[in-house]
Structures are given as C-alpha cells and as structure tokens.
Image: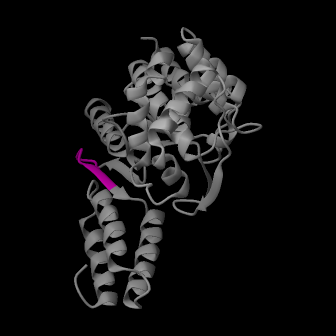
C-alpha cells in the first residue's frame, strides 16, 4: 500500500473522522457530516482519488493569551482529511527524520519534554564546565506568518517526492491561503512548521557541532563554552534563515550560562552548587494571576460556573507543578479562596 493509498483507505479515513469529531458534536459542520458519515467519508475518498478535492475557506477568531494571535480553523471535512494524512503518513515519517532536539508536536514530546531536555543539558554542561559558558537564545520573527509556500513545497517534495499523491495533497493545504504564511490552528500546519526548520536543526547539531541545543517550533537555544563561537553560530543561523525567507527577532541574544534561560514559559537555571531550578516567568505569573482572579470574581458573582474555573485553574496548577513553584501555587490558592470564601 502506497502512502497515498493509506490516506484514501476507508478504515483510515473513518478513524480520522472519529478523531476529528471528538468534542465537536455541537458544531453545525461536524453535525451535518455526522448525519451521513459513511457517505461523507466515501465522498472524501472519491474526491482524493479523482484529484477533485479542494480545501474550503477558514473561520477566524482571536486569542489573547499568551499573546494576541489570529487563529484560522479549517472546515470539519478538511480536519478529517488532515487527521488521516498526518496520522498515517506525515507524522510517522517526520518523526523518523527529526532530531531528538526538535521537541514539539510529536508522540512522547511536548513542552515538558522540551523543559526536561533543557534541564538535562544544563546539568551535563555544568558537570563539564561549571558556570563558565554562554547561551544563545533565538526566536524567529512571526514564524507562521512568514513561511514561504514555495520553500515549504520544495521541502515537502524533497521528503515525500516518492509519492506524487501525497505531494499533491500537501500542496492543496499549503496553497489554501494566499501569499506567505500558514494559518495557525490546523494540525497539518503544525507538522509543516516542524519540518520547515528541520534542516536548521541538522545544521546546528551536525555541521556547527553544537551538543546542547533544543527547539520548540520557532523558539530555540544553543549552549556552548565560547561566546565567540556562539556569535559565529548566530551569523551562520541568520544567513541560513534568510534562505528560508525568515529572520530572528529582537529578543535574540547571548548571555552568561549562570543567568539561565527563559524557555517554554519557565526560567531554568543552575545554582552555583549545581542544583537545577525551574520557575515560572514573572510576566506569566502576573498574567495568570489576573486571569484567575478575574474568573474567581465572575464565579462569586454567579456569572461563571465554578466548574470552568476549577478546570482552567487545575490545568494551570498541573503546569506549574513541573517547576519549583510550590509557594506560587499556595499564594494563588489563598487569593482565589479569599474571593470565593471557600476552598478551590
């Protein structure tokens, strides 16, 4: 079975439909598809086989945390095709070619994996060189919005050119918006973003010889004992990103290893005696406090169900539990309980 045949296989497509509809039963597009699910799945398969499938338009909305972004989401039938393509072809192959330092959007990886990798690398660096070293922290300017369609298609065709059907289908999603950039909020675009900078990962780790490196989407760091060598690396990376039509933003800088590094919502550093510490960034603390105190006041006023506060706050407490944040959690509990007059 070729990769494209995996996408047009009925059992794979129906499984993708069931995954796509999880938690979306109340939405009109998924409800309509669900009424004639078998017919809908067969129609998608016929359109793919006949090359008549086209990506529908996107719905837009804004999110404001952790910063303001425009999110564009696909129609339900496009989500079904994305699930089938990603789960059966794209992600399995990508995971085989990615380096372990590429931390996002893969099974067994994620923010906690990235934080643990950073901490492990910092401890290993400290055991060899002590506090004598430097960190280059980089961030790509508006990464998703500046991905070149032509560059991305060249990369996709390089890795999947053995199957013209897969290349054709990927092109449909890449060219589903005009100009540069990929819509945020789609599963397939997360995979494309991971792949877009895979060559940079290999440049840094293999050609530049950086042992202590990690990347989560467009946020990455390099650790080395020589500041001068990191400056050379920065020049190479900047020039390479230019070939991908990307630039680094103003937050990119080199600083001493002893200062630690802000990465994935935490500030991680090593104390002089070698103890790793992971704390929530100050701005993230303030944002979370404002958010949950506002939610608590709405609950107290009877405007918001307490279950929504408990679910959201519980997820946040689970997040900060991966850092040295016990006192932060206790302080937040006390403030929320003071508003609610009870235990959260």
- Residue at the (47%, 49%) spot, across then down: 35
- Residue 47 percent across, percent down from the top left: 60, 27
Rendering quarter of residue 239: top right
- Residue at the (46%, 48%) spot, across then down: 34
- Residue 76 percent across, percent down from the top left: 54, 46
Camera-side residue of 120 and 217: 217
Camera-side residue of 252 and 273: 252
Q: In this view, does 261 lie to the left or right of 59?
A: left
Which residue is outermost to the top?
162
Q: Does residue 67 appear in the picture of this structure?
A: yes
Camera-side residue of 342 and 223: 342
- Residue at the (50%, 31%) spot, across then down: 42
Q: Is residue 138 left or right of residue 11?
A: right
Give the main secondary structure of the magenta stretch. Answer: loop
- Residue at the (29%, 66%) spot, across then down: 314
- Residue 269 percent across, percent down from the top left: 34, 48
The magenta segment: 271-278
Q: Is residue 335 rendered magenta in the image?
A: no
- Residue 163 percent across, percent down from the top left: 54, 11
């Amino acid at each position: 079975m070729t990769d494209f045949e995996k996408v047009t296989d009925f059992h794979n497509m129906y499984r993708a439909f069931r995954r796509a509809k999880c938690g979306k039963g109340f939405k009109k597009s998924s409800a309509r598809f669900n009424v004639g699910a078998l017919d809908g799945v067969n129609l998608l398969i016929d359109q793919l086989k006949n090359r008549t499938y086209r990506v529908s338009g996107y719905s837009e909305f804004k999110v404001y945390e952790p910063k303001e972004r425009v999110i564009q989401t696909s129609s339900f039938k496009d989500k079904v095709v994305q699930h089938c393509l990603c789960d059966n072809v794209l992600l399995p192959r990508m995971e085989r070619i990615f380096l372990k330092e590429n931390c996002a959007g893969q099974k067994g990886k994620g923010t906690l994996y990235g934080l643990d990798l950073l901490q492990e690398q910092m401890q290993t660096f400290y055991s060899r060189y002590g506090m004598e070293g430097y960190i280059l922290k980089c961030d790509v300017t508006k990464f998703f919005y500046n991905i070149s369609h032509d560059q991305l298609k060249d990369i996709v065709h390089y890795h999947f050119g053995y199957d013209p059907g897969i290349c054709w289908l990927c092109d449909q999603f890449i060219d589903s918006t005009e100009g540069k950039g990929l819509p945020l909020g789609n599963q397939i675009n997360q995979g494309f973003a991971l792949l877009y900078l895979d060559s940079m990962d290999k440049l840094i780790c293999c050609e530049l010889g950086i042992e202590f490196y990690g990347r989560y989407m467009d946020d990455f760091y390099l650790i080395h004992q020589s500041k001068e060598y990191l400056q050379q690396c920065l020049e190479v990376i900047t020039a390479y990103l230019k070939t991908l039509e990307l630039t680094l933003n103003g937050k990119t800088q080199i600083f001493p290893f002893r200062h630690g590094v802000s990465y994935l919502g935490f500030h991680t550093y090593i104390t002089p005696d070698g103890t790793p510490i992971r704390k929530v960034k100050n701005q993230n603390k303030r944002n979370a406090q404002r958010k949950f105190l506002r939610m608590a006041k709405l609950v107290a006023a009877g405007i918001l169900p307490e279950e929504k506060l408990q679910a959201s706050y519980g997820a946040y407490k689970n997040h900060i539990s991966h850092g040295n944040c016990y006192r932060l959690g206790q302080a937040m509990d006390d403030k929320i309980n003071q508003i609610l007059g009870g235990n959260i």
